[in-house]
């Protein structure tokens, strides 16, 4: 996770090849999604001779490639277009690491629980969407998601803050003392999804426990704002109050799945309905401007880093998915997805192709930025408009074919491959910005948030 200036191209503003998006036409939505996906993959060379499958390379961290292949699974699920299936399977299987749990030693020096989780969430999506199963001698989608979950469950840390997961996995990485919402939220959502897929109550119990911890410790406020994280050397008594859209999305979808799977118990169902509604309320208030999605913490000031430039993709993805499992949210969510998709399309007039998308959707034009995140944001918000045309996530009893392994990933973090070279300034930069943000967050509270 490193800061970076926006990738401002000295690229010519495009002429007339903007993306046209007619939300009344499935073909138009599919074609817009295809254009956004092609633009996204223009940054990917992992399937070319000499490339490493699954890696985007500088300036993109490893996790974002996992997120990107998750978006391509969604693309196939929404459109039926299998153009990218081969490179997606290739990448998802190449990066599993020696323990088949998405911990490739090459990535140890920046491998947080959140990074690992984005690959696990992609393999979970593959199982739920019935993405073509890997060859029998390869690890299977469900087992990979279980391996990520199980390896993280073993990292539950009671030594500070009353529990939770640390951001980083290895002591030698900066951020080992930080407990953040995206790591804990990803575990929560993955637990809920594994519970739904397998009907194994243990996963739901973990998801319950995680929600309770996040709320009790104060990472989620009583008005359902979700803060970035907290320093465990202070026993989580102070917070970095910055709010990111992907944190809202990850908890929203998880809560909706919990509601979907508690139909038999009125009290528990009522609890998850209230939580889903409250999160939806805060999400729509904080991350939308005139019904258009925006990254409130960095877009107005134009300083979203490379990671942050992709966060709207995940909020789009999980808001749409929420409508499938908690149908009463549909009429609140879909108008926002529609307005946001229309707005996103107006930003796609950039780059040499004239249809690369920008960071901001609120301005009515291209803002001069291009990148994987911008393309993924547009891709997810476009294709989310097809949610009423596709089935919901399958499970083991409803047509799912992915083979699981309940004990995958329980071997522990035995081989962290301590980096041979000293950690470079570049590698530390992520933690550097983090520290600055923590200080601002602690000193200034939510100064930036004019909501
Ligand atoms: C890599 O994948 C892209 C996108 O599917 C495709 O256009 C390209 O031809 C592939 N390259 C190779 C060398 O297979
Ligand atoms: C790890 O790095 C080596 C050396 O660059 C490369 O050959 C290998 O393919 C990489 N593996 C993964 C999973 O990225
Ligand atoms: C740390 O925080 C947890 C949860 O908030 C609390 O239960 C515990 O007593 C605190 N420990 C110390 C040493 O203050
Ligand atoms: C349910 O999940 C737990 C936790 O991963 C595992 O230990 C247990 O074996 C699973 N039970 C079944 C019946 O698969
Ligand atoms: C949304 O949240 C605000 C502030 O917490 C509250 O005043 C309002 O009643 C909520 N709206 C709904 C529909 O729950
Ligand atoms: C739960 O989610 C499934 C999958 O999308 C859906 O078919 C079902 O109707 C949902 N259940 C309820 C009670 O809404
Ligand atoms: C569903 O889960 C059960 C129990 O874990 C297992 O026996 C069965 O093979 C699974 N079905 C599929 C299609 O994977």
Image: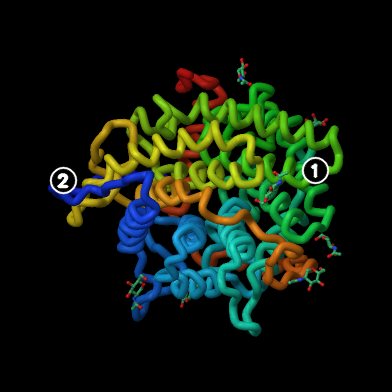
Image position of 159 (left or right of 108): right
Q: In this view of the protein, can residue 197 be seen by the observer?
A: yes
**Badge 2: few (under 14), some or many (20 or more) residues near its Cα, within 10 Å?**
some
According to the picture, the residue beneath numbered tag 2 turns out to be 13
According to the picture, the residue beneath numbered tag 1 turns out to be 262
Compare marks 2 and 1 and give the one earlier in the sequence. Answer: 2
Image position of 278 (left or right of 201): left
Coordinates of residue 295 in the picture (x, y in percent): 43, 34
Q: How many marks?
A: 2
**Badge 1: few (under 14), some or many (20 or more) residues near its Cα, within 10 Å?**
some
User: What is the basis of the colouring in this image?
Assistant: rainbow
Residue at position x 64%, y 43% from top?
177
Quadrant of residue 309 within the rendered picture: top left
Give the residue furthest to the front: 24
Quadrant of residue 101 within the rendered picture: bottom right
Coordinates of residue 33 in the picture (x, y in percent): 37, 55
Coordinates of residue 213 in the picture (x, y in percent): 76, 37
Residue at position x 46%, y 65% from top?
80
Image position of 134 (left or right of 408): left
| In the foreground, 334 or 346 | 334
């Amino acid at each position: 996770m490193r800061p970076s200036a926006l990738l401002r191209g000295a690229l010519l503003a495009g002429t007339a090849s903007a993306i046209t998006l007619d939300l009344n036409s499935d073909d138009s939505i599919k074609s817009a999604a295809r254009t956004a996906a092609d633009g996204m993959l223009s940054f990917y060379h992992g399937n070319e001779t000499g490339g490493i499958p699954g890696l985007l390379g500088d300036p993109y961290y490893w996790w974002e490639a996992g997120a990107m292949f998750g978006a391509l699974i969604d693309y196939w699920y929404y459109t039926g277009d299998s153009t990218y299936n081969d490179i997606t399977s290739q990448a998802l299987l190449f990066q599993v690491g020696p323990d088949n749990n998405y911990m490739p030693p090459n990535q140890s020096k920046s491998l947080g629980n959140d990074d690992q989780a984005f690959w696990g969430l992609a393999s979970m999506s593959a199982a739920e969407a019935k993405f073509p199963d890997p060859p029998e001698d390869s690890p299977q989608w469900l087992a990979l998601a279980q391996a990520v979950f199980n390896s993280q469950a073993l990292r539950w840390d009671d030594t500070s803050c009353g529990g939770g997961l640390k951001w980083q996995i290895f002591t030698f990485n900066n951020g080992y003392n930080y407990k953040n919402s995206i790591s804990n939220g990803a575990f929560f959502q993955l637990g809920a999804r594994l519970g739904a897929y397998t009907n194994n109550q243990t996963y739901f119990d973990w998801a319950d426990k995680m929600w309770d911890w996040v709320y009790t410790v104060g990472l989620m406020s009583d008005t359902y704002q979700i803060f970035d994280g907290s320093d465990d050397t202070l026993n989580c008594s102070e917070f970095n109050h910055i709010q990111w859209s992907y944190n809202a999305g990850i908890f929203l979808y998880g809560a909706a799945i919990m509601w979907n799977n508690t139909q038999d118990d009125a009290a528990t169902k009522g609890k998850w309905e209230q939580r889903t509604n409250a999160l939806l309320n805060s999400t729509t208030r904080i991350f939308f401007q005139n019904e258009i999605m925006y990254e409130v913490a960095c877009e107005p000031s134009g300083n979203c880093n490379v990671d942050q430039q992709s966060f709207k993709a995940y909020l789009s993805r999980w808001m749409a998915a929420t409508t499938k499992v908690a149908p009463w949210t549909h009429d609140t969510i879909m108008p926002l997805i529609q307005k946001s998709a229309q707005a996103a399309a107006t930003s796609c007039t950039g780059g040499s192709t004239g249809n690369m998308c920008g960071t901001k959707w609120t301005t009515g034009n291209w803002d001069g930025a291009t990148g994987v995140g911008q393309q993924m944001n547009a891709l997810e918000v476009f294709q989310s408009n097809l949610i009423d045309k596709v089935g919901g996530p399958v499970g083991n009893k409803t047509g799912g074919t992915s083979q699981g392994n309940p004990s995958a990933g329980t071997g522990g973090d035995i081989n962290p491959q301590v980096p041979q070279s000293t950690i470079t300034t570049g590698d530390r930069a992520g933690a550097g910005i983090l520290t600055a943000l923590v200080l601002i967050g602690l000193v200034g509270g939510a100064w930036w948030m004019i909501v």
